[in-house]
Amino acid sequence: MTTAAAQPVSIARLPGPRTAPLVGNLHQLDLPRLHQQLERWAAEYGPIYRIALGRRQRVCVSDLDTINTMLRERPDTFRRTRHIETIMDEMGFNGVFSRDGEAWRRQRKVVAHALNPAHLAQFYPAMRETTERLRRRWAGTQGTALEVCRELMRYTVDVTAHLAFGIDVNTIETDGPVVQQQLDRVFPMLFRRTVAPFPYWRYLKTPADRELDRALAAIRTTVVDFTERCRERMRAEPGLFAQPTNFLEAILAAQAEEAVDFSDDEIYANVITLMLAGEDTTANTLAWACKFLVDFPQHFARARAEADAVLGADTVAADLDAIRRLDFIEALAHETMRHKPVAPILGVEPKVDIELLGCHLPAGTEILALTRPNAMSDDHFAAAERFEPGRWLRADGGEEPHNPRAFMPFGAGPRFCPGRGLAMLEIKAVLAMLVRNFDIALATPGRDVREQLNFTMLPEGLALRFAART
Ligand code: HEM
């Protein structure tokens, strides 16, 4: 935040692209490419500028210190955009991602606890089995073209459902439960409503909105049923209260002890939040990493040499100790997220009137924080455009000076992603399994793989062939 001596300007006086009546800047935006346009405008208009989605004004910020301050000063001075909370309220699941203030604090404690390193360690054997299933699936595909995001979603769905409910949905080896297809409808609609210039669905439901309503009703029925079954199991095995084996059991145990004041609605909301927050993000990050492995054979070779050395005779990492030793693969994951952060825009708003970079922002102004421009700037990373995993490794001489504060694929401050540990575990387990066992190639060489924003950012239509390692 600045304390500029000059009088702060109003939002209307900020630079920004010319707006048209009613639509604002909507006509200049291709929504699946929204983040790229906003990044181009940041390069043109500077660290703070304004846009209008219809009549809704938004302020876009790419200044590193300001973004860090906004993210760190939550929940006191800033919050996640209220608009998201309203939309999620309408969808009936307001959990730790969208809540603010005291409700957020309570929920955050339970969610962060369920995802802490001790629980992840207990959970690893189940994840190892899921990784092995994915290996078997790919081994059976015999070089047919596979849509990579879909493939990896099967993996993250299985891992997350196991962690959330303790249920083995096994979408890798079966078509999976219908609830998954229903969950798939939620993110695209959430994105559509978040950027809609006008809440049309409150007045007129399109077929997609009606489908969403049906999907949400079915998801609720399934989760309530899982919760009841889980309660019964816990009554039958009271030992689970002291040693819960999944997220649902952990919340029910805390609820029974009255350690947390959690309503059944909040339990439902947070189970769904975990399922949604944990699936696309990790799967899409993995998909981008696959793309880089294809693009850079020298990094593939180094990752394979590391996996061979660490995994030994195993096809997947046997335990957490093996995972911890995958330094280059971890560096490759970091470099992937620097180039391709799957959440490139974070929505925040001030709770009080505030001055930011010389602009007066009234409480409630919607701010879009653009995190990638800093991560891709030579000011913070040497030769920033280069894809160079070695820059993350001390063993490589820590050769490339960089500013870790400019790298925030998991956000920053008190609302930093609590799933980071789980995500890194999944990413390292899958990449090590992949390079150890398979050669991969683009299904359609030469085809441009575009970024597509669908709440999270994915490689559009990326298809690969997996062949047994030669
Ligand atoms: C590569 C994978 C992932 C990425 C890149 C990612 C990224 C993010 C980002 C950018 C945020 C917002 C942080 C902020 O506002 O400062 C977030 C929040 C969150 N993430 Fe993740 N995430 C990933 C995986 C996961 C997983 C596996 C889970 C759990 C199963 C998870 C659960 C959450 C939750 C619950 C929040 C809301 C936290 C809060 O508001 O207090 N995420 N994530």
Image (cartoon, helix red, strand yellow):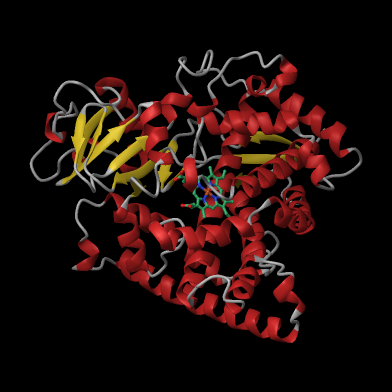
- The residue lying toward the viewer, choosing from 289 and 207, is 289
Q: Viewed as shown, does residue 216 lie left or right of 239?
A: left
- State whether residue 36 is above or below residue 169: above
Q: How many numbered tags mark residues here? A: 0
Q: Residue at x 12, y 34 (%)?
A: 12
Name the image quarter holding residue 24: top left
Q: Residue at x 72, y 28 (%)?
A: 328
Q: Position of residue 343 (x, y in %)?
A: 45, 41
Residue that protrudes farthest toward the left in the picture: 21
- The residue lying toward the viewer, choosing from 222 and 293, is 222
Q: Residue at x 35, y 26 (%)?
A: 63
- State whether residue 56 is above or below residue 18: below
- State whether residue 309 is above or below residue 143: above
Q: Is residue 329 visible?
A: yes
Q: Residue at x 43, y 40 (%)?
A: 72
Q: Position of residue 302 (x, y in %)?
A: 76, 24
- The residue lying toward the viewer, choosing from 150 and 224, is 224
Name the image quarter holding residue 325: top right
Q: Is residue 460 visible?
A: no
Q: Quadrant of the N terminus?
A: top left
Q: Quadrant of the C terminus?
A: top right
Q: Viewed as shown, does residue 5 lie left or right of 164?
A: left
Q: Position of residue 46 (x, y in %)?
A: 28, 22
Q: Position of residue 289 (x, y in %)?
A: 61, 35
